[in-house]
Image: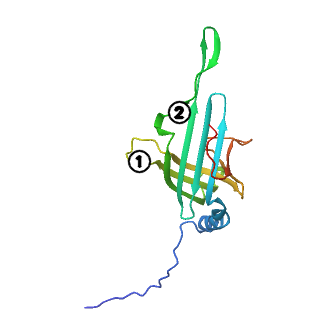
């Protein structure tokens, strides 16, 4: 009976499917992760809607947030246009707290125009565990920039930047409404 043994070199270093993406992700996390960690808020008030959101990005990749959203309608009463009272938007539990995860990554996409720095947020409303409820966040957005006072990414619920980006301000604020 013959036995064949093969000796293979083992390394504790993982082999990444896309080493370039892994390296760029690590650089992005090192550069911006500590800056993003903390609490941010956004508020946008229009004639028919007002929206506030606060996000706390923890250094361990967890996320906590709260959202307050109200709307009103322009109606005609006795020939005169007037706004209704503000009411909370309750559809899908938008006025609620939520928890989840966040991460920065560099992504190579089949369409090169979508490749680049990304901010990924995934969160569920607190107390809701079934698959029939909408997510608080399922966002894979273009990460634009962060500094000590602003966090900016493409997309999101509130696009308050000049080019359609979403800009949050650092701080643990409360809604003005």
Residue sitting at the far top: 78
Name the residue rendered at 61%, 55% in the picture: 39
Q: In the shown orientation, is residue 139 left or right of residue 127?
A: right
**Residue that mark 1 sits on:** 127
Vertical comparison of 21 with 122: above or below: below
Q: In the shown orientation, is residue 41 left or right of residue 94?
A: right
Q: Which mark is residue 88?
A: 2
Render colour scheme? rainbow
Q: Which SS class for mark 1?
A: loop
Q: In terms of sequence position, does the residue under pointer 1 or pointer 2 come before the other? A: 2
Residue sitting at the far right: 162
Name the residue rendered at 40%, 46% in the picture: 128
Residue sitting at the far bottom: 1
Q: CA distance from mark 1 to mark 2?
A: 19 Å
Q: Nearer the viewer, residue 49 or 132?
A: 49
| Res 3 → quadrant | bottom left
Whether residue 111 is visible, yes or no, is no
Q: Nearer the viewer, residue 111 or 68?
A: 68
Vertical comparison of 2 with 14: above or below: below
| Res 71 → quadrant | top right
Q: Nearer the viewer, residue 103 or 71?
A: 71
Quadrant (top left/top right/bottom left/bottom right) for the N terminus: bottom left
Residue 142: where, in percent of width, then height? 64, 51
Vertical comparison of 127 with 12: above or below: above
Residue 57: where, in percent of width, then height? 58, 57
Quadrant (top left/top right/bottom left/bottom right) for the C terminus: top right
């Amino acid at each position: 009976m013959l036995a064949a043994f093969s000796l293979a070199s083992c390394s504790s270093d993982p082999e990444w499917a896309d080493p370039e993406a892994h390296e760029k992700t690590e650089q992005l996390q090192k550069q911006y992760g500590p800056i993003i960690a903390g609490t941010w808020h956004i508020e946008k008030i229009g004639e028919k809607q007002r929206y506030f959101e606060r996000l706390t990005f923890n250094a361990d990749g967890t996320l906590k947030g709260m959202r307050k959203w109200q709307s009103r309608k322009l109606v005609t009463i006795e020939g005169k246009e007037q706004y209704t009272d503000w009411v909370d938007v309750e559809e899908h539990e938008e006025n609620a707290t939520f928890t989840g995860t966040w991460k920065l990554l560099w992504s190579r996409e089949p369409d090169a125009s979508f490749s680049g720095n990304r901010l990924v947020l995934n969160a569920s409303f607190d107390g809701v565990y079934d698959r029939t409820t909408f997510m608080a966040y399922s966002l894979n957005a273009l990460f634009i920039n962060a500094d000590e006072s602003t966090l900016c990414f493409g997309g999101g619920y509130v696009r308050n930047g000049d080019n359609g980006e979403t800009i949050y301000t650092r701080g643990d604020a409360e809604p003005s409404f």
